[in-house]
Amino acid sequence: MDTHFLLRSLPTTKRTMALEMTNIATGVISFAAIFGGTVFGVIAARRLPGHHLSNETQSAITVSVAVIATLSALVLGLMITTANSSFSARSDEVRELSLQVIRIDRNLRRYGPEADDARAKVRAWAAAKTQQLFPEKGRPSVSSETAIETLESVQDALLLLQPKD
C-alpha cells in the first residue's frame, strides 16, 4: 500500500506528525540493523575457521565493502539530486504563482476603486494559499476546498466588474 497516499489524506498537522514519526522509525530501524550486523559479524568472526580469515579472504571482503560503499554513495547522490530538482520545481511554481498574483493586483489597482472588492478577495486567496503551502505550527491549516472557494469568489468578483469606457 502506498504510504504517501495515506499521509496525503491526513490533515496537515497530523501529516507532519506522521512524517516525523516515519523518519524516527526509519532511523531506529536503520540503527538496529547496523548494530545487529556488527554484533553478528563479531560473533561470526570468533566462530569461523582460520582458513576463512586469511589475507585473501580479507581483501575480497574489503573489495566487496568498497563496491557496496560506492553504490551507496551513488544512490545517495541520486536521491539528493532528485530532492534538489523537486525543490527547484516547487520553488519555480511558487515564484510563478506569486508573479501572477502581483500582476492581477496591479491590473485591478489600475482598474480603479470599483475593483477594490476583487483586490481584497485576491489578497484573501493569496493568504489562504500561502497558509496552505507553508503551514505554521499552531495555526489550523486551510483546506483545499476553502482555497478553491476563495478563488471562485475572486473569479466571481472579476466577472462582476464593468468597464466604464
Image: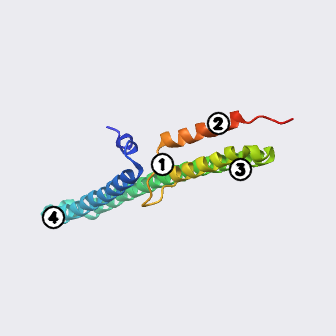
User: Could you classify mark 3 by the number of other residues whose Cα lies within 10 Å: few (under 14), some (14-19), or many (20 or more)?
Assistant: some
Question: Which residue is pictured at 14% across the width and 66% down the height?
Answer: 46
Amino acid at the residue labelled 4: Ile
**In the rendered structure, are the residues bearing label 1 and label 2 in contact, judged by CB atoms less than 8 Å apart?**
no
Q: CA distance from mark 4 to mark 1?
A: 55 Å
* Placement of the N terminus among the 4 image quadrants: top left
Q: Which label's residue is closer to the chain start, 1 or 3?
A: 3
Q: Secondary structure at mark 2?
A: helix
Say which residue label 4 marks: 43
Amino acid at the residue labelled 1: Val
Say which residue label 2 marks: 155
Say which residue label 1 marks: 142
Q: Which label's residue is closer to the chain start, 1 or 2?
A: 1
Amino acid at the residue labelled 2: Gln
Percent coordinates x, y for residue 2 in the rendering: 35, 39
Percent coordinates x, y for residue 86 in the rendering: 54, 48
Q: Report the number of discs.
A: 4
Q: CA distance from mark 3 to mark 4?
A: 66 Å
Q: Is residue 49 left or right of residue 37?
A: left
Question: Which residue is pictured at 69% across the width and 37% down the height?
Answer: 158
Q: Which label's residue is closer to the chain start, 3 or 4?
A: 4
As rendered, which of 70 and 87 lies closer to the eye? Answer: 87
| Disc number lying in front (3 or 4) | 3
Q: Which label's residue is closer to the chain start, 3 or 2?
A: 3
